């Protein structure tokens, strides 16, 4: 018996609906098409599958048996289709990218847009995070590329290679209504009057302490340490916090005028941002193409 999934679906619809008319309505096709499918199946098996009457259509014993097998057959068809779809997705070129928060808002979006116009097929996945865990993920093979500007104190594993992209600059950021913005001149001592927020896993806190010490001043009385850029945005808008952070992390708010940058006063510095890859692994074509796009876009941003 040749299996026709369409006719089996029609058979099941009649059994479930109890009539040819209800089966036609459920499937959105004509009743004659349903009747033709059932007649064809009855010709193949050589017996009636439904008892037809005013009350509708009731499955015969042969019909019940074939309906049960039809359900199993269509379930297997569905499973096969799902597995083939998953296999097709697995064969699709993929690039896993790790990126720091600031580069995720500046360099990467422009690069992805340009990459997709040229190579729309590869699937991209992006993990935003800190340099250390991202580079660890690169070493483990979970990521193909990492874009990051690590602090000077972070040791880079010799199994990784890096290509310079651009310089990232830190800045002292405050809310647009911060009292210090009303001052004609700002001294380091005045910064002690306000709370600070600083990323936890960075050398910025050491830099803050060192600069105040050089001025023979104590460190700020209140320093909140957090990696959350969303928390920094909220605090800077609501309270007179001062945040030492990469400009790119809060770039959209700075451009919109919601936040502002204080004079340098010796706190700010710049760090090199790199494109990291594994030395031991030959980079695949999609990742290699994306790397080239990233480096070209970085040159435009310098």
Image (cartoon, rainbow, N blue to C red):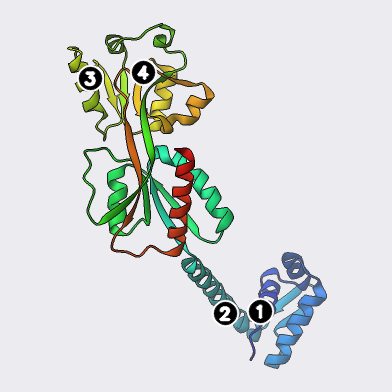
Going from N to C along the chain, the mark reached first, 4 or 2, is: 2
- Corner quadrant of residue 166: top left
Q: Position of residue 23 (x, y in %)?
A: 73, 70
- Corner quadrant of residue 277: bottom left
Q: Are marks 1 and 3 in contact (CB under 8 Å)?
A: no
Q: Quadrant of the C terminus?
A: top left
Q: Which mark is residue 211?
A: 3
Identity of the residue drawn at 50% across and 21% down: 258
Q: Which residue is mark 2?
A: 73
- Could you tell me how far apart the alpha carbons at marks 1 and 3 are, in whole angstroms? 79 Å
Identity of the residue drawn at 23% across and 26% down: 207
Q: Position of residue 162 (x, y in %)?
A: 32, 51
Q: Residues within 10 Å of mark 1 (few under 14, many from 20)?
A: many
Q: Which residue is mark 4?
A: 241
Q: Residues within 10 Å of mark 4 (few under 14, many from 20)?
A: many
Asked if 258 appears above or below 7 in the picture, the reply is: above
**As rendered, which of 145 and 48 lies closer to the eye?**
145
276 to the left or right of 43: left
């Amino acid at each position: 018996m040749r299996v026709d999934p369409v006719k089996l679906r029609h058979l099941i619809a009649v059994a479930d609906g109890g009539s040819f008319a209800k089966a036609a309505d459920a499937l959105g096709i004509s009743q004659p098409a349903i009747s033709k499918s059932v007649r064809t199946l009855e010709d193949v098996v050589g017996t009636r599958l439904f008892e037809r009457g005013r009350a509708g259509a009731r499955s015969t014993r042969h019909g019940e048996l074939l309906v049960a097998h039809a359900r199993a057959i269509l379930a297997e068809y569905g499973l096969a289709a799902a597995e083939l779809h998953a296999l097709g997705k697995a064969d699709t070129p993929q690039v896993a990218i790790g990126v720091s928060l600031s580069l995720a808002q500046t360099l990467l979006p422009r690069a992805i847009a340009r990459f997709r116009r040229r190579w729309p097929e590869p699937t991209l996945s992006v993990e935003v995070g800190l340099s250390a865990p991202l580079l660890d993920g690169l070493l483990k093979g979970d990521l193909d590329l990492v874009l990051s500007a690590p602090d000077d104190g972070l040791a880079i594993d010799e199994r990784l290679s890096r290509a310079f992209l651009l310089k990232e600059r830190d800045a002292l950021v405050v809310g647009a209504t911060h009292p210090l913005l009303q001052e004609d001149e700002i001294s380091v001592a005045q910064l002690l009057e306000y709370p600070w927020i600083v990323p936890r896993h960075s050398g910025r806190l050491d830099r803050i302490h060192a600069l105040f010490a050089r001025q023979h001043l104590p460190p700020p009385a209140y320093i909140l340490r957090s990696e959350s850029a969303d928390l920094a945005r909220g605090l800077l808008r609501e309270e007179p916090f001062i945040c030492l952070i990469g400009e790119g992390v809060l770039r959209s708010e700075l451009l919109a005028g919601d936040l502002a940058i204080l004079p340098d006063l010796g706190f700010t510095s710049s760090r090199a941002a790199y494109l990291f890859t594994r030395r031991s692994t030959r980079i695949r074509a999609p990742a290699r193409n994306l790397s080239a796009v990233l480096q070209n876009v970085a040159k435009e941003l310098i």
